[in-house]
Image (tube, rainbow, N blue to C red):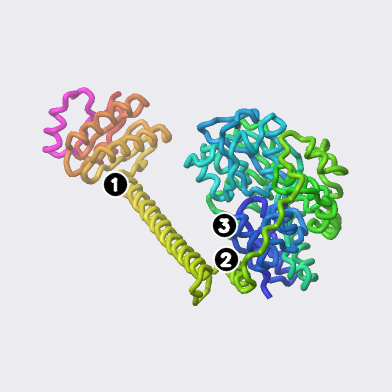
Amino acid sequence: MTLRIVYVPIACSMPLLYAASRGFFEQKGLSVELRRAPSWDAVRRLLTHDKVDAAHVLAPLALATGLGIDGRAAPIRVRALQNQNGSTLVMSKNHGRITAPYELVGKVLGVPHRFSMQYYLLCDWLARGGVNPLIDLTIREVPPPRMPRWLALGRIDGAMFPEPFAQLVVDRGGGVACMQSREVWRGHPCCSLSFGARFWRETPERAAMLLEAVVEAQAELDHMDPEGRRAAAGLVVARGYLPVEARSALEKALAGEPMSPSDDLGPDRLGFAPTPFVEYGVWILAQMQRWGQLAGDVEHLAAARAIFEAEPVRGIAARLGMADTAPHLDGVREFSFDDPLGAVRAAPFCAHRSERPPAPPYTLSEPARERIHRILDRLADMAWGAPDLGLSTFEDDELGELERALDESIRARAFAEEALVEHMELEEAHARQDARIEAQRALIRELAAPLAPVLPGVLLLPLVGRIDRERAADIEERALRAAWERSARRVIVDVTGARLIDEEALSLVLRLSRALRLIGAECLLVGVSPEAARILAASPDPAGLPRCVRDLSAAIGAPEAAFPR
């Protein structure tokens, strides 16, 4: 049986992707199908409806899904963290580098999801600087792969970018790195490897093997030097798990390079310690309360332990020589783990609500609820790749109308995506054709004006065919460079094969003769026809004409003294 695992294509998924690329799953007898998800909500739907066995998912989103804070609850388990740190606040180049939270007032910022460490760390950083993240600016959810485009279009002023997209935007000059998430909390958790309920309940042995394979990949990544991590990035990209255009950015992020020459944020950008300590879950739950996502009180420790399972993976990490024996809490030391709710209530801009709103009474009949659940289940299938709802008939009532509208909208979107793919393929084909044409042009230019050494210090430049302005400039540049690099004393320009000496060719001869003289080389012209001679004789600058010789043998065989400088 093949295990189905979904991931979002960011650097946080490296342990999972590296394990697949290195064959760790096959070594343990596991067959695994990895598939990209377009967004974190798609990952949540797949987990909630038990469509996948495991998922790379934001640690806070896994907690919210497991407890039913974000819609339907699913008894999932966070079996390992995938990474620590790894996100950067990047602002549009139009805004430049910001240095303090108050500079973001009125701006629009993107985060991967409302249940993400990027969101909570950004809110915490803003609040420490006296900015209310719920009122003083706008924070939007943007899937990480879409963040660069949204920034370029001006839909957001900046974003908490995960790698490699933060580095990619900086490398392309589209944004400025301002603050790394590790500055708020060094060693903070980020993404997780979460298992669906059926997988870890029904096949615990296979779940244990999958967990071990991923942690072994984390140990390799953790122990690698920068060059090893660069190679790991190349391997994952070569397997098609992460986008090719992000390879260089991914290599830099994994190797720990500064984001730019002026970057003073340091190289410590991505860590791969795997243990999901319960303290992390407690802090995340408290942030959900602080920013109004979770009303009332909860048993923080019990709730976190129900989702975050630390012991199995900590044992594997210890066996593999990973220093992951205690949680990294330096950035949140002032937070009270004994009284989480009291800590957030004492924090600035706390939006916690003491009472939970009452659940709305059910007004739908049981058959109607079943039909809605069926629609939601099919929508979850679509997150894995199903083309439509797969419903062949629709009942003649309000829900049937909803089913038809959803099915039609989904099909229309599929047609639009298909057309977009075809358009992109056509553009790629045109780009490849343009590249081939340019390569052929370059070859023609090379063959049409080859520079060949015929004697020590003597180069031959035969000119063939018509010489237009573009070709004349190319010939001049190549001839001067070759004469300089080879320390040539003489360049013989053979115009025997040229169609005619026109204004452009005459201009080339005059410029080339003067330029060669300036670098200490003599220009000799051979093969001048009577027609060409008349045109050359009418030159407005006769003194600038090169010396002319009747044929090539005379130019090559004549002693250098016959051509005084």
Res 18 seen here: no
- Other-residue count near label 2 (Cα within 10 Å), few / some / many at <14 / 14–19 / ≥20: many
Q: Report the residue marked by disc 2.
A: 379
Amino acid type, callout 1: Ala
- Of 297 and 413, nearer the camera is 297
What is the C-alpha distance between the residues marked 3 and 2?
A: 14 Å
Work out whether mark 1 precedes mark 3 in sequence or the reverse, and give the earlier one. Answer: 3
Question: Badge 3: how crowded within 10 Å, few (<14), some, or many (20+)?
Answer: some
Q: Residues within 10 Å of mark 1 (few under 14, many from 20)?
A: some
To which quarter of the image does residue 268 belong? top right
- Give the answer, above or below, for where 263 lies relative to 21: above
User: Which quadrant does the N terminus fall into?
Assistant: bottom right
At x 50% / y 65%, what residue is drawn? 406
Q: Which residue is mark 3?
A: 38
Q: Which residue is mark 1?
A: 448
Of labels 1 and 2, earlier in sequence is 2
**Residue type for callout 3:** Pro
Residue 547 within the magenta-colored segment of the rendering: yes
Which image quarter holds the C terminus?
top left
Q: Which residues are magenta?
A: 528-549
Q: Position of residue 48 (x, y in %)?
A: 67, 63
Task: Tell me where residue 181 sits by quadrant.
Answer: top right
Q: CA distance from mark 1 to mark 3?
A: 51 Å
Residue 547 spot, x, y in % from top left: 23, 29
- Picture residue at 52% right of the left edge, 37% below the top: 173
Choose mark 3 or mark 2, whichever is in front: 2
Q: Position of residue 108 (x, y in %)?
A: 56, 38
Q: Amino acid at mark 2?
A: Leu
Q: In front: mark 1 or mark 3?
A: 3
Q: Image check: 308 left or right of 406?
A: right
Asked if the residue under mark 3 is in contact with the one under mark 1, i.e. CB atoms within 8 Å, the reply is no
